[in-house]
Image (spheres, helix red, strand yellow):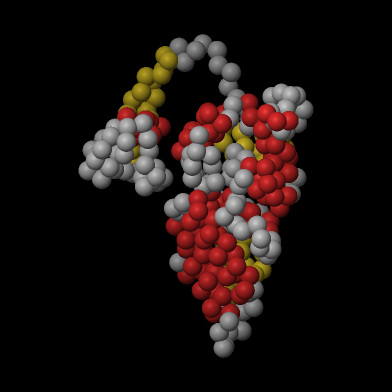
Amino acid sequence: MTDKNDERTVRCPVEGCDSTPLARGINLHIMRSSGDGHGPQGEVPDSLSLENLETVGEREVEMDYPDERDNEKHARLCPYCSVTFTGISGLMIHLGQTAGRKNHPANPKDRHEPSDFPRVEVDAEGNVQQVADPREDSTDSRDKAGAVPTARVFRLIADLIADGETRTAHRVRRALLGADDAVAPSRDEPAHPELFEALLTQGRAEQTDHRVTAALEGEGVMVACRGESGFLSATEARDVAARLEQVAASEDWRDDDTRDLIAFLRHSGDVLDGDKTERGLHEEFNHWR
């Protein structure tokens, strides 16, 4: 069956390039080009940001669909950032766009099979409720050197997130996937680790409907994100800001929200440690920024 769709076109982020490829084809355009800021052919330079690309219009695209399609009904969980995507194709696009950045592997297609990633049930806000089929496993065998199969590790992380055990999921991810090394393991856990894990997930998400809310009060800073919240002292606010900044720098986060939150937490710490703090103090993050 042949169908026609109107698909979004974007402007190439390379300065001086007038190309306006389809949004889903921007990686291919850059990899096929070379020089003039595009980098070596077959590569996407780390200096190029493919986030928040400028939309320039739409293009009619003819699609050839098979008569019968095995549409995937379940979301797939990315174990590296705890964000869910529609179907395996959506997840693989995400892994390709974040390859080597934000805690994701540089060679996802060589490193993983589509069956590695667990199918999950999510609520209206994209929060993981449960693994779609906990008995399903890509293999009962073990990987090289007797290691537990990757799919089983990913499914464990999904189960922990669904059960609200975000702190344990964070530790498993760090220990088994080599993730979050930017948060020095020699340091103690941050105050409100579930909140910190939610802030990490928020910062690593390419697109999300979730928002971070924060407010400076007379005795501390209230921060909430993805269903987790905490009331931070001046010292704790500075510590969370430092940890977020360290991870953001190592994983090359480029979102303004995290940068502004870090600045707000440090500002709040300075105010709280001041000689005089107003009793009725209330300063909203969204208004402050």
Outermost residue on the bottom side: it is: 275
From the viewer's perspective, tell me whether residue 173 is left or right of residue 254: right
Q: Quadrant of residue 77?
A: top right
Residue at 63% from the left image edge and 26% from the top image edge: 115
For the C terminus, give its image quadrant: bottom left
In the image, what residue occupies the spot 28% across and 42% down? 37
Q: Percent from the top left, x then y, of residue 181?
A: 59, 52
- Write down the quadrant of residue 76 in the picture: top right
Quadrant housing residue 243: bottom right
Q: Is residue 267 above or below residue 248?
A: below
User: In the rendered view, would you say 215 is above or below 206?
Assistant: below
Which residue is rendered at x = 73% and y = 30% of the image?
146
Q: Determine whether, in the image, residue 280 is placed left or right of residue 62.
A: right
Q: Position of residue 2 (x, y in %)?
A: 42, 14
Q: Nearer the viewer, residue 222 or 159?
A: 159
| 55 with respect to 276 (left or right) | left
Q: Position of residue 164 (x, y in %)?
A: 73, 48
The answer to whether residue 122 shows anywhere in this view is yes
Query: Which quarter shows the N terminus?
Result: top left
Residue 43, compared with residue 195, is above or below; it is above
Give the percent coordinates (x, y) of residue 269: 56, 75
